[in-house]
Image: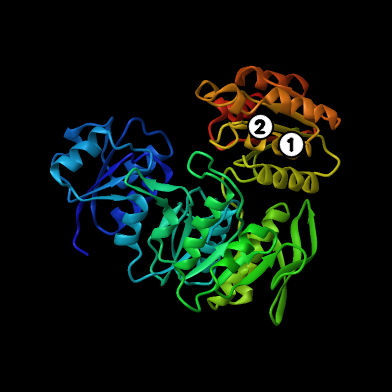
Amino acid sequence: MTPRRIHLTAIGGVGMTSLAGLLVGQGHRVRGSDVDVYPPASDQLAALGVPVARGYAPANLDPRPDLLVMGNAIRADNPEAVEARRRGIPTLSMPEALETLVLPGRVPLVVAGTHGKTTSSSLLAWVLRTAGRAPGWFIGGAPIDLPAGYALGEGDEFVLEGDEYDSAYFDKGPKFLHYRPAGVVLTSVEFDHADIYRDLDHVKSSFARLLGLLPSGAPLVVSAEFPHAVDVARGVGRSFETFSAAGEADWSASDVRDGPDGLRFVLRGPGESFAMRSPLLGRMNVRNLVGVAALARRFGVPAAAICEAAETFHGVRRRQQVVCDGPVTLIDDFAHHPTAIEGTLVAVRERFADRNVWALFDPRSNTTRRRIFQDRIADALSHADRILLGPVHRADELPAEERFSPAEACARLAERGRRAAAAADHEALVRAVLADVQPGDVVVVLSNGAFGGVLERLREGL
C-alpha cells in the first residue's frame, strides 16, 4: 500500500484515535485536529507520533492531505469540512476509512447489537488471539487484556465492534454497514439512540441491512433472549443459529453458578458440550460468552482455546469494572439503557450476595435524557437498595414534558420500598454517598460519560 498523508478531523474520539493507530501501523503519515484531546487519547497519539492541531481551521489542511477522515461529531459547517469541499480533498467517514484502507483482504467478524457488543467483540479478539490466529481488531472500548482497542494483526480474521450509530454528516447510515461482514454475532436488538432513530422498527431496519450484507453461508449467531433480534434475522430470510444464557437455543448454558470465584457453567452446542469458567460476573456475560463461543466454533477455533480464553479474559474497562475493593466496593459501569442497568445490578446482587447495593445513575445519553424509558429506568434501578440519581445532562435543551424526571423515578422507587433521592448536582450526590455508605456496601456507578467526576471523587473519598 502506498503511504498517504491522512488528516483526521475530530481525532480525539475513541474510534478516531484507534483508526490513527491502525493507519500509522500501515505506514501512513497521520495528523489530526480536535477542540481538546485528553488522556488516554492524547497519550496514545503522542506515543504514535501523531501531531494534533488544537481547534478546527482551514490552515490545518496545509499541506494538503491526500485524504481527510471526518469523525461523526463534525457538522457540515465545520471550517475543515467547508475547506475540504472547497479544495476537493477526498473525504471519508471513519467506517469508510476502515472499509477502504484496513479491511480489504481480511475476514471481518462483526459483533453488533444494542447491548454487549464491546465486551463480546473484545472477548472474540481474545479468543482468536489465544488460539494463535493473530487477529486484527477495532473495538470502541478499552479491553483490559488486549494491548489496545485496535490492532492490525497478521491473521485473516479482523474483529469489529459493529456500531449502529451514524457515520458522518455526509454518511448517515450506521457504521457497521461499511464492515463487509463474513460472520456476525447479533447480541440484542432494542430501541436506543433516540436522537437518530425514530422508533424500534427504524432500529430493526438498520440491523436487517447489516445481516443482508452477509454472504450466503456465512455464520450468523443471534441471541434467542431478544425477540426483536430473532425477528430481524428471520426477516432477512437466511439461516442462523441462536444462543442463550438459559432456555432453548442452539447454543446455551446450563448449570450456571456465579460466586466469589467467578462464573461456572456448561456450554452446550450442536453435538458438543464443555465446561467453562470466567472471572466475569452476571448472566449477561454468560450470554456474551456463549455467543462468542458459537461464532468462534464456526470458524474452527478449538473448544480448548475458547475455554482458556474465557478463563483468562477480564473484560473491558467501564463494564462492571471493580475500581476499588476495600471496605467499600466501587464498580464502574457504562450501562445506561434499562436492560443493561438491570443486568448489571442483578449480576452485582448475585456476585455480592447479602451486601447492601447502591446504584448511582447518570441520565446522560440521548435516550435516557428523555422520558422514553421513564418507568423502565426506575424499575431497573429497583434492584439496588439505595439509589441516587444525578441531574439530567444538558436538561435545558429539552422541553420539560419530554425530559426524564429524576423526581418521578424516585417516587416510583419509593412505591417499591427503595430509598431513592435525586441529587441537585454531582457534588451533592458524592456527599450523600460518603455520608451514609458503610463498610461492606457495594456502590455501582452507572454512566456512559464523565458523570461530573463522581467516580473519581468517590474513589478518593473511599
Q: Position of residue 318 (x, y in %)?
A: 58, 42
Residue hosting label 2: 361
Residue hosting label 1: 381
Q: Count residues near mark 2 (Cα–Cα under 10 Å), then give few for <14, some for 14-19, many for 20+.
A: many
Q: Is residue 80 left or right of residue 303?
A: left
N-terminal label among 1 and 2: 2
Q: Answer with the quarter of the image where residue 45 lies.
A: top left
338 relative to 77, above or below: below
Q: Secondary structure at mark 2?
A: strand
Quarter in which the N terminus is drawn? bottom left
187 relative to 239, above or below: above
Question: Given the image, on which type of amino acid does mark 2 rest?
Answer: Phe
Q: Residue at x 76, y 54 (%)?
A: 261
Q: Position of residue 122 (x, y in %)?
A: 53, 57
Q: Residue at x 27, y 33 (%)?
A: 77
Q: Count residues near mark 1 (Cα–Cα under 10 Å), then give few for <14, some for 14-19, many for 20+.
A: many
